[in-house]
Amino acid sequence: MAKTAKVKIVKNGPYLVTGSIPLLRMKIETDSYGDPWKWREVQRYPLRERYALCRCGKSQNMPYCDGAHTLQRFQGTETASRERYLANVKEYLGPELRLTDKPELCVAAGFCDRDAGIWNLTVHSDRPGFKEIAIEEAANCPSGRLVVWDKQDNPIEPDYEPSIVVTEDEDGVPGPLWIRGDVEIESGDAQIYEKRNRVTLCNCGKSQNMPFCDDSHFET
């Protein structure tokens, strides 16, 4: 029997990862206009059955935990809502696509702003190329804030195997942990968050929406 791909959140501690989940590092590449365009893999870490990832942002062995949270007296209280993604989403309707948007999940990756912007692309998705670009932009949104749906109301999602990505922007600024492929995430109080194909977890210790990223890593 295959082992469950799982991330267990330790109270005021690290993320414990089990199930031999591949860990890699990816960087955002921009287009000729300077807009985020695609992800590029820059490193693949040795595969381990289990490992611990830093959640406080103070480890000297990033992305792995080195126990710094104990010295820092890290307070990582989980404050995120346990509601499902589709609760209270904003919707944008177009002739070929529907877009759902949950702004509180934004991590400021910026893929959604390219060309006309995913909202306008969706509303005018019958125009040449607009549908395809909207689908591409949603797929590159690591947090799953943005999801596009076809006319049969099926989500259009990339086919991810369970994996964890250590993200960076085009300037090398560290971003959140991108959890892909319906990995099970268990809270510190042993509750299971909604399984999703794309979510982002905070690894800087600053988020006000723990355990999820809220783009606080950009704070100086």
Image (cartoon, rainbow, N blue to C red):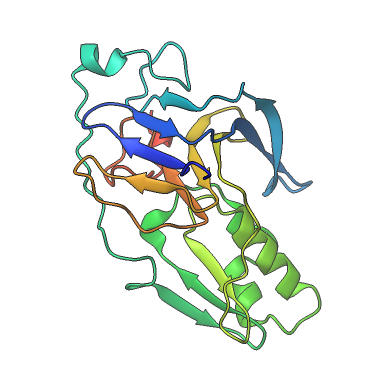
**Occupied quadrant, residue 127:** bottom right
Answer left or right for 66 relative to 198: left
Q: With respect to residue 103, does 207 lie above or below?
A: above
Report how many numbered discs are placed on residues in the image: 0
Identify which residue, 203 or 206, lies in the foreground: 203
Specify the quadrant that holds the C terminus: top left
Identify which residue, 178 or 163, lies in the foreground: 163
Answer left or right for 11 relative to 162: left
| Residue at (46, 26) in percent of width and height | 50
Report if residue 113 is visible in the image. Answer: no
**Occupied quadrant, residue 14:** top left
Answer left or right for 162 relative to 60: right
**Occupied quadrant, residue 73:** top left
Give how far across and how far down residue 157 sits, in percent: 61, 64
Answer left or right for 180 relative to 191: right
| Residue at (27, 26) in percent of width and height | 13
Report if residue 133 is visible in the image. Answer: yes
Q: With respect to residue 116, does 2 lie above or below?
A: above
| Residue at (37, 46) in percent of width and height | 185
Q: With respect to residue 128, does 206 lie above or below?
A: above
Give how far across and how far down residue 208 sits, in percent: 26, 43
| Residue at (54, 36) in percent of width and height | 21
Q: Residue furthest front?
A: 1
Give how far across and how far down residue 165 sits, in percent: 56, 36
Give how far across and how far down residue 78 sits, in percent: 22, 43
Identify which residue, 15 or 30, lies in the foreground: 15
